[in-house]
Amino acid sequence: MTHLTRRSLLKLTAGTCAAALIAGAPALAATPADTLVAAFAIDDIISLDPGEAFELSTAEVTSNTYSLLVRLDLADTSNVSPDLAESWTVSDDGKTFTFKLKPGVVFASGNPLTASDVAWSFERAVKLDKSPAFLLTQLGLSGDNVTETAKAADDHTFVLTVDQPYAPSFVLNVLSSTVGSVVDSVLVKEKAKAVTPSAEYKYDTDFGNDFLKTASAGSGSFTTKVWKANEAVVLERNDTYFGEKAKLARVIYRHIKESAGQRLALEAGDIDVARNLDPGDIEAVAKNPALKTDSAGKGTVYYISLNQKNPNLAKPEVREAMKYLVDYDAIGKTLIKGVGEIHQTFLPSGQLGALDDRPFKLDIAKAKELLAAAGLEGGFTVTMDVRNTQPVTGIAESFQQTAGQAGIKVEIIPGDGKQTLTKYRARNHDIYIGQWGSDYWDPNSNAQTFSSNPDNSDDAASKTLAWRNAWEVPALNEQTAAALLEKDPEKRAAMYGALQKAVLEDGPFIIIFQQVEVAGVSGKVDGFKLGPTFDTNFLAPISKT
């Protein structure tokens, strides 16, 4: 995008005050009465296209700008609730899902939303073949069959046919993820660019990808007005929204990474919400009578991963040794106090089959024994890619110090979210520290990415976290696939328990904690409530007094 001038910001946010907020002007007396201003580390955003976006902060933006067939039921997260779908049925063989759409829904553009838009959105996501496409292709959809497996029976009936009789809850939960967002096919086709088929685009169109990287074409409660990388995202109320209209005219996410900067801006009234506070700043906000906090346990785990392309990290003794070189107790008492809980298995608490096994603790002597058994008694040197935001920077520095005690020299390579993610996704790292949020509230979301890697080649279609770390696990691939077809909840939970134990014992993942998201909120804000996932942080109910 071109540089955002103050004049253009004035037009976009309808007021000098809001414009100054984005442009980084000096402290203001108050944020606009009709605008929520949130400080948020948004440097992980690569694209706002729901067919491409796969980052946590992007999920929050798309969940408020697009509608889906169904969403996670916040009152009972074991179920989904209707969004665009008024009702649905599942065939006797468990393979055909028929959705009846709510009547009268229109996109923000004013175009009517029909089952053809739903079908084309599925086709588009599959054929675009970006990172989230595997969520749909795992159901048996492909570029060759998607027009038959995801189609409109009439204007208000969408029919999805999957390739196996999966547990229905799994299929519905997949459809509640960002990739299930329904786009305005009329508008996006107009914006699509003709391209020469290539490795990036297999077809002769970009399916509007270039347009949707920085815009929106949905029917959510807000529309995207501006995204300026590492600076701001501006959303404006969609007055054509079919549900409860947003109470505020706009929402501005300001990119402020440092916790202290967020807290000071909140105390000064320059922002309404601080989203990335460290434990000390959370305590300060909680003690301020003009402010308040909101928190929610998230389906997000933080982990350190070890690329098996590195011959030292590929040794099973080294993988185990690394798990004894994390000072879990110190991290829990300091770096993540109030914002996370120590957790060592890949399923977050609250999901079917989640375990709370925590067999590892800091043990330098044990780690040294394992390194010696691997023939690395003298240690080795390795690099670690780290997003330069807390608490990951602090955890990386803690790990660097404890690993050093065992003779492992860890060189930290800092970068912003986009830089570190791009390198990680290309499998060009040694060690990476990051976070994984469930794409949908079903154990398969995490199981598939941590315990499945059906094709370890560099050009594989399915690029799970196991793939990113070049971990080949044929037996676990089969177990992960089998768990998808088990309809008995108790048996299915036991299967996921076994997978967690296998990854915990032998996997290239050092899972450290599960996130508790905490936000500092101005006392003038009402209706702000964090959800269990980043795509359930909804903006429409928020108001200001």
Image: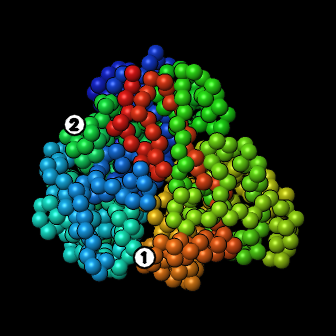
Percent coordinates x, y for residue 116 in the rendering: 16, 62
Q: Residue furthest top?
A: 29
Q: Secondary structure at mark 2?
A: loop
* Circle 1 SS class: loop
Q: Is 538 rendered above or below residue 19?
A: below
Left or right of 245, for residue 290 = right
Above or below, 237 against 383 in this view is above
**What residue is pinned by disc 1?**
487
Q: Quadrant of residue 4 in the image?
A: top left
Q: Position of residue 524 (x, y in %)?
A: 45, 23
Left or right: residue 517 versus residue 172 is right
- The answer to which of marks 2 and 1 sits earlier in the sequence is 2
Judged left or right of residue 390, residue 423 is: left
The quarter of the image holding the C terminus is: top left
Mark 2 to mark 1 CA distance (whole Å)? 42 Å
Q: Residue at x 52, y 76 (%)?
A: 491
**In-front residue for pair 10/517:** 517
Q: Residue placed at 66% from the left, 38% from the top?
A: 279
Residue labelled with disc 2:
239
- 196 to 454, vertically: above or below: above
Q: x%, y% of residue 282? A: 62, 33
The one nearer the camera, 492 or 242, is 492
Q: Nearer the viewer, mark 2 or mark 1?
A: 1
Would residue 389 be seen by someone viewing this image from the given angle?
Answer: yes
Task: Give 336 or 254, whichever is nearer the viewer.
Answer: 336
Amino acid bearing label 1: Lys
